[in-house]
Image: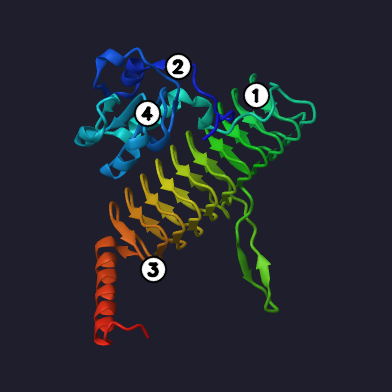
Amino acid sequence: MEQNWFFPPHQGIRLGDLADRIGAELSDASVADHPIHGVAPVYRAKPGDVCYMLSRKSRDELESCQASAIICDKAIAAIVPSHIPVLLTQKPHTAFALAGALLHGEALRPSYNTSGRGIAPGAFVDPTARLEPGVDVETTAVVGAGAEIGSGTRIAAGAVIGPHVRIGRDCTISAGASVLCALVGNNVIIHPGARIGQDGFGYAPGPKGGMIKIVQVGRVIIQDHVEIGANTTVDRGTMDDTVIGEGTKIDNLVQIGHNVRIGRYCGIVSQVGIAGSARIGDGVMIGGNAGVNGHITIGDGAQIAAMSGVASDVPAGERYGGIPARPMRDFLREIAEIAMRSSERHKKKGGKDE
């Protein structure tokens, strides 16, 4: 890949210092002074790059690797060519994430669209809004009446902060996002086009066969260190609150219905849909394109496989998959039985397709 000017190389970190910062052991102390400037995949890493390996599946990529160091576990260190130093750790994925944050810190959240600071010409901040010193509002952004925003927060171009919304410190509200009827904590990242706090889908049968809209008068509460992906929607509550717990990370294109409560440190992947009033415990992981029924509970630490349909409660700590979702061991057993029966039918027909 040609030079990436969006994320230029770091000025350089000593390999020995990098090892200390990420909690890894450098296999060859003689190269501790070598500079590291960036990250790269194994197959195209050049001198100055650091990369990582999680399994032996990357063995073939090592043939073209010229990295200054590879982060890996001791169990696979032996397959790394002798001329490439190794950063040994039991948690290579975590160590690589820490290395990336050190080398490309600007990529951890959406970048500024303009170089200016403060309230830009062309931005609109209602006179009754209260902004702490150090808040940046880019051109064409709107901050509504009575809104409160903490220091270090940046409101990007085209974002809309609704009346009386409260946003904490050191947040990033990206281009084109809208935040309405919400209380947002500190160090929150909301990516471009996200929609927070609009009314959810709620209707009652009408007298003539149509539908009558049910008012949605709740709020959205987003706790500290939450990240919400691009074009994700979080509906406000009907009468209670929709809550996103501390440290939870939500991917792009996720739909979270009204009154949903998501616990702390959850991971929710793209195209997940969570229907109204569902309860998601702490540390829950939900794979992409899964659907969660309304008014059910997923217990702490549960894992939901991608493309699953969760129709009923999931106990804490369980792994569920399939449609409808059931314990993973049952789901995999059923898949194996279906495959076996299909194979047997094929054999009875002489191996000929219908």
Q: Earlier in the sequence, mark 2 or mark 4?
A: 2
Question: Residue 151 appears at what percent x and percent y?
Answer: 60, 23
Q: Which of pointers 2 and 3 indicates the residue nearer the eye?
A: 2
The reply, left or right, for residue 261 in relation to residue 194 is left
Q: Earlier in the sequence, mark 1 or mark 3?
A: 1
Tell me whether the residue at label 4 lies in contact with that at label 3, contact meaning CB atoms closer than 8 angstroms: no
Question: Residue 109 appears at what percent x and percent y?
Answer: 54, 32
Picture quadrant of residue 68: top left
Tell me whether the residue at label 2 lies in contact with that at label 4, contact meaning CB atoms closer than 8 angstroms: no
Residue 186 appears in the rendering: no
Q: Which of pointers 1 and 2 indicates the residue nearer the eye?
A: 2
Q: Which of pointers 2 and 4 indicates the residue nearer the eye?
A: 4
Report which residue position mark 3 lands on.
323
Report which residue position mark 2 lands on.
12
Q: How far apart are the alpha carbons under marks 4 and 3?
A: 45 Å
Q: Earlier in the sequence, mark 2 or mark 3?
A: 2
Report which residue position mark 4 lands on.
66
- Which amino acid, mark 1? Val
- How dense is the environment of label 2, judged by Cα within 10 Å: few (below 14), some, or many (20 and up)? some
- Asked which secondary structure carries label 4, the reply is loop
Q: Earlier in the sequence, mark 4 or mark 1?
A: 4
Q: How far apart are the alpha carbons under marks 1 and 2?
A: 30 Å
Quarter of the figure with the C terminus: bottom left
Q: Earlier in the sequence, mark 4 or mark 3?
A: 4
